């Protein structure tokens, strides 16, 4: 027997007896949407889709979206334990930001002025989120560019079925590193929401404000505290014009201002008062839904205007320079589901995207008249659900891009659910693509002959339940190939610098497993473990081993105790050494975090208070070389429903 196979089998067997997933006891009747864009039971899905429910979010009161996501199996969000203004990096199955697509209410999100077309989750408060689904693997067939290693589908809160309902909340807490202690509150989060339904009209509106200080992003003696402030306003209104037609509109405004520190280079002081960044995002959209006898037709459309500006101190000139990045994005995704019969349906859609950008810095200017492109992607997915347990999800997508040649991707996802035994076997083979960004095409380092990065993912796994569905266990092994990656070329003699497609392939393999056990009506144990084996070229900030363990104890109808444990394996990092002018590799040690929470309903279904202690053991650790992380901190909060 192959030695590596024995190694994987041993770990899997061990984990099957002692490892435990941060989610509710899974019911195969649970509805998921990620793998078809339309709701269907988890029993019929050919993917292991992790769903973070409203109840899960409530058990993580006071945490950011990034921190909550980082507890999901196989998902690492670097920067979630640092100061709130620290940039975030997302890693799924060895893929980083450009390969992880974030979808909010059916609309792919991106910053078209960024180098890698990624979305900044720091703009989104957890208090506006209803649920999150995480689907891993190459999923460009349904979701297009960027969905190479996974898709994070976020559903924002909706209207209640009452005439008027709402809530008001306030959280406050300390902000300390493992080496500092300030007892006074440094972290404030407050907001209000109002929603309801009157005849054919439903509405939802919320306002959130977050302010933190107390920690410097960069490490060092006598560094100043970096402030973070964010304001979020969201409004939704819907009209049920007929029993078949629903018209939904949304608009939101997000503003984030933060002090920031320059990149760590081991010599220069990156921490100056002049460095301040401001991000403002305005979004609005229209989402009609039409149901008919044989199916459903939906349109997810949205417009995004995003501007990022940076005031940055220049040590060379002694002045403060300004950098401005502005992007506009239009996304329209029209998709129809047609049921041929009870066992077979097809999803047919077309997605249109338009992006442009404007950049002005002390060194260059990029005009939106030149820096723009559009994409038109027709796609089709067929889903067959047999009566005897066989399920097949297969589809293809054609990317028609205004700059380069066409790109075809496809997926095949058969699975089998045994009728007389609680076991589901899943397999899949899927391809994906990542388009070059506007910056990579049109900046001074741009290259108009760039072609998309290509990804292939194969996976096999199972999901099963025991003890009258009190225990759920799943495991998935995966293999991913990344080719035609976009890299950066620099000639030290001529100083020529530009983006290029890198020859060769990067191969990633690993497995993920989760277990959830409802020991009694009061006690639940959950946990997960992931193993990621990546090539040296990709091995930066990605842990090979990572695990989470949670224990929830509901003492009575009003009282909940929760404790969470997280282990993150040692990782590699690198920084530019300002003394030697070379890139220096470093190794960051492993770390363990223990967090605790208690919630109590002072007034049933009306008034709830909570207290939380994060990093109870005050573990000192490093997420990113040169930057601080949070030590032991206390949070208190109150939520009033009306």
Image (cartoon, rainbow, N blue to C red):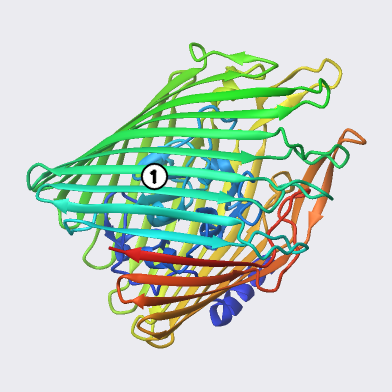
Quadrant of the image occupied by residue 272: top right
Quadrant of the image occupied by residue 41: bottom left
| Residue with the most extreme right position | 580
In-front residue for pair 80/566: 80
| Quadrant the C terminus occupies | bottom left
In percent of width and height, residue 102 lies at 46, 44
In percent of width and height, residue 505 lies at 65, 40
- Which residue does the numbered mark 1 point to in the structure image? 104
Q: Does residue 341 lie above or below 492 as drawn?
A: below
Q: Does residue 168 lie above or below 288 as drawn?
A: below
For the point 45% across and 60% down, the residue is 170
For the point 46% across and 35% down, the residue is 145
Q: Does residue 477 lie above or below 381 as drawn?
A: below
Secondary element at tag 1: strand
| Residue with the most extreme top position | 369
For the point 57% across and 38% down, the residue is 257
Left or right of 613 in this view: 420: left
| Quadrant the N terminus occupies | bottom right
In percent of width and height, residue 332 lies at 32, 31
Left or right of 603 in this view: 184: right
Can residue 49 be seen from the camera position used here?
Answer: no
| Residue with the most extreme front position | 184
In-front residue for pair 133/349: 133
Can residue 358 be seen from the camera position used here?
Answer: yes
In percent of width and height, residue 347 lies at 26, 43
For the point 45% across and 69% down, the residue is 59
Left or right of 252 in this view: 450: right
How many marks can you see?
Answer: 1
Neighbourhood count class around disc 1 (C-alpha, 10 Å): few under 14, some 14–19, many 20 upward: some
């Amino acid at each position: 027997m192959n030695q590596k196979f024995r190694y994987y089998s041993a770990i899997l067997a061990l984990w099957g007896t002692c490892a435990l997933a941060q989610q509710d006891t899974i019911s195969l009747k649970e509805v998921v949407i990620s793998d078809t864009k339309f709701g269907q039971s988890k029993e019929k899905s050919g993917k292991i889709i992790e769903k973070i429910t409203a109840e899960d979010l409530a058990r993580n009161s006071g945490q950011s979206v990034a921190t909550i996501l980082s507890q999901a199996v196989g998902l690492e969000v670097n920067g979630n334990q640092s100061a709130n203004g620290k940039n975030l990096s997302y890693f799924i199955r060895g893929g980083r930001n450009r390969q992880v697509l974030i979808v909010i209410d059916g609309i792919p999100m991106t910053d078209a002025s960024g180098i890698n077309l990624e979305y900044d989750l720091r703009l989104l408060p957890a208090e506006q989120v209803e649920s999150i689904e995480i689907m891993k693997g190459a999923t460009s067939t349904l979701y297009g560019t960027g969905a190479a290693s996974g898709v994070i589908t976020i559903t924002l809160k909706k209207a209640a079925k009452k005439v008027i309902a709402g809530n008001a909340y306030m959280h406050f807490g300390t902000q300390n590193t493992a080496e500092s202690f300030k007892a006074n509150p440094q972290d404030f989060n407050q907001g209000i929401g109002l929603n309801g339904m009157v005849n054919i009209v439903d509405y939802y509106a919320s306002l959130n404000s977050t302010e933190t200080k107390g920690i410097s992003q960069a490490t060092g003696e006598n560094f100043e505290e970096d402030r973070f402030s964010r304001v979020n306003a969201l409004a939704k209104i819907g009209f049920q014009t007929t029993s078949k037609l629903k018209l939904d509109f949304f608009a939101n405004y997000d503003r984030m201002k933060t002090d920031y520190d320059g990149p760590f280079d081991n010599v220069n002081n990156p921490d100056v008062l002049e460095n301040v960044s401001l991000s403002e995002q305005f979004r609005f959209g229209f989402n009609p839904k039409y149901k008919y006898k044989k199916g459903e037709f939906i349109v997810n459309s949205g417009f995004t205007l995003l501007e990022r500006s940076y005031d940055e101190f220049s040590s060379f000139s002694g002045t403060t320079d300004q950098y401005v990045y502005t992007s506009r994005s239009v996304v329209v995704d029209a998709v129809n589901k047609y049921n041929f019969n009870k066992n077979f349906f097809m999803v047919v859609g077309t997605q249109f995207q338009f992006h442009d950008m404007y950049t002005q810095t002390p060194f260059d200017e990029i005009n939106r008249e030149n820096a723009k492109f559009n994409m038109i992607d027709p796609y089709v997915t067929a889903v067959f659900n047999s009566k005897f347990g066989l399920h097949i999800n297969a589809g293809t997508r054609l990317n028609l891009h205004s700059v380069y040649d066409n790109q075809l991707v496809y997926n095949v996802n058969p699975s089998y659910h045994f009728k007389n035994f609680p076991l589901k076997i899943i397999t899949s083979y899927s391809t994906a693509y990542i388009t070059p960004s506007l910056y990579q095409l049109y900046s001074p380092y741009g290259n108009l002959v760039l072609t998309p990065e290509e990804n292939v993912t194969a996976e096999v796994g199972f999901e099963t339940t025991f003890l009258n569905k009190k225990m759920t266990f799943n495991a998935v092994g995966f293999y991913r190939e990344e080719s035609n990656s976009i890299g950066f070329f620099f000639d030290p003699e001529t100083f020529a610098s530009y983006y290029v497609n890198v020859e060769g392939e990067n191969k990633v393999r690993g497995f993920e497993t989760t277990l959830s056990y409802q020991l009694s009506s009061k006690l639940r144990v959950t946990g997960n473990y992931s193993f990621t084996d990546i090539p040296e070229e990709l091995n930066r900030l990605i842990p090979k081993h990572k695990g989470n363990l949670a224990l929830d104890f509901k003492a009575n109808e009003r009282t909940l105790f929760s404790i969470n444990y997280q282990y993150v394996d040692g990782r590699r990092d690198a920084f530019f050494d300002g003394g030697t002018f070379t890139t220096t590799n470093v190794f960051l040690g492993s770390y363990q975090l223990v967090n605790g929470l208690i919630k109590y309903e002072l007034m049933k279904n009306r008034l709830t208070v909570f207290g939380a202690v994060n990093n109870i053991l005050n573990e000192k650790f490093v997420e990113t070389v040169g930057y601080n992380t949070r030590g032991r901190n206390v949070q208190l909060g109150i939520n009033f429903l009306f």
